[in-house]
Amino acid sequence: MRMFLALVHHPCVDRQGKVITTALTNVDVHDIGRSSRTYGAERLFIVTPVTLQQKMVTEMVHHWTVGEGLTRNDRRAEAMRRVTAAPSVAAACEVITSLTGQAPLVVATSARMEGPDSTWAGMRERLRHHDGPVLMLFGTGWGMAPELVEGADVCLPAIVRDPELGPSDGYNHLSVRAAAAIALDRLFGA
Amino acid sequence: MRMFLALVHHPCVDRQGKVITTALTNVDVHDIGRSSRTYGAERLFIVTPVTLQQKMVTEMVHHWTVGEGLTRNDRRAEAMRRVTAAPSVAAACEVITSLTGQAPLVVATSARMEGPDSTWAGMRERLRHHDGPVLMLFGTGWGMAPELVEGADVCLPAIVRDPELGPSDGYNHLSVRAAAAIALDRLFGA
């Protein structure tokens, strides 16, 4: 199994459900890059169709991996080295196919997942026997557009608190940085 | 069991191991506040002895809970409402004692934990039968000063990848935002 992540800036939705392109957020790239490196994800695609934002990703990675940042913090370089921009999820899938010779199993996450088709424990187990590449999608803004979630091969349940601790009031508004970290830990944590 | 968190800005260490006070980081407060709310932690103490930084915490909380931010995002208000500044971990413990009538069980986390005295699964189980308050400590900078970790009642292991996935190269440089989210999920996740 070879693991890839995508942080999706388009197509996402705003709080009214309108499809939008969200802006690149520096700390997302750093945090999810560091989590990717810790849990062994091979590459983190920052998905945005905006050329200028793709260029910002490239410049950020350059700063930390060959520029000034490298001498300041080489652990950060190791995390940033696996970050790359992609214009769409489909383009990221093509890169993965050319790298591995196989199309990835696309796995969607969402804080508002309706009808997930695997449990986290089931997915954890499945990935231990999965031969090909896997691409996990994380949305920004108010989440990925429904067509992206519906088009995924597997949809995972929303991350929530153990219901045995008491009735949930439905609050699960984690940052994408927190959600991605938890997702990686649920699938690949010790 | 009543759960409390502390994000510790002092005493922490820099990369040379020197004791320092780190600066308040806006996104830490938001992210860990949101994770606290999601997993049912009652209060998040931002621990700093610097009066001006304590004032910044208070102003941030005010902005999101009664000021302009409230009308912009009421989910953020719910997260920020549980954030408060404290001058030290001891002061946070005193607040907890006065709130609950009992001193908290203090639980330390660290990316470089030597000699943890509980597993994550063991702690998860223990907390389900624990009657009093619990305070979990998270360090900033290059981690909490050793005396703070050593003074805790329980030290949890560093968060790492499942060793069955292949030999670890020891990289576990998560952001504190990611580490706190994972810790809460390991103890209270579904």
Image: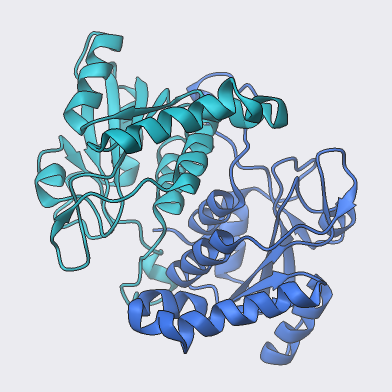
Chain colours: A blue, B cyan
On screen, residue A93 versus residue B118, left or right, reads: right
Q: Write the residue at 77% across / 69% down.
A: A48
Instruction: Locate the N terminus of chain B by quadrant.
Output: top left
The part of the image, by quadrant, that contains residue A29 is bottom right
Q: Write the residue at 54% across / 73% down.
A: A41
On screen, residue B93 versus residue A4, left or right, reads: left
* Residue A78 percent location from the top left of the image: 43, 80
Vertical relation: B147 (above or below) B142: above
* Residue A137 percent location from the top left of the image: 70, 62
The answer to whether residue A137 of the structure is visible from this angle is: yes
The answer to whether residue B46 of the structure is visible from this angle is: no
On screen, residue A54 versus residue B142, left or right, reads: right
Q: Write the residue at 45% across / 50% down.
A: B177
Instruction: Locate the C terminus of chain B by quadrant.
Output: top right
* Residue A33 percent location from the top left of the image: 52, 69
Q: Write the residue at 39% across / 45% down.
A: B183
* Residue B162 percent location from the top left of the image: 40, 64
Seen from the viewer's position, the closer of residues B184 and B165 is B184
The part of the image, by quadrant, that contains residue A57 is bottom right
Vertical relation: A119 (above or below) B133: below
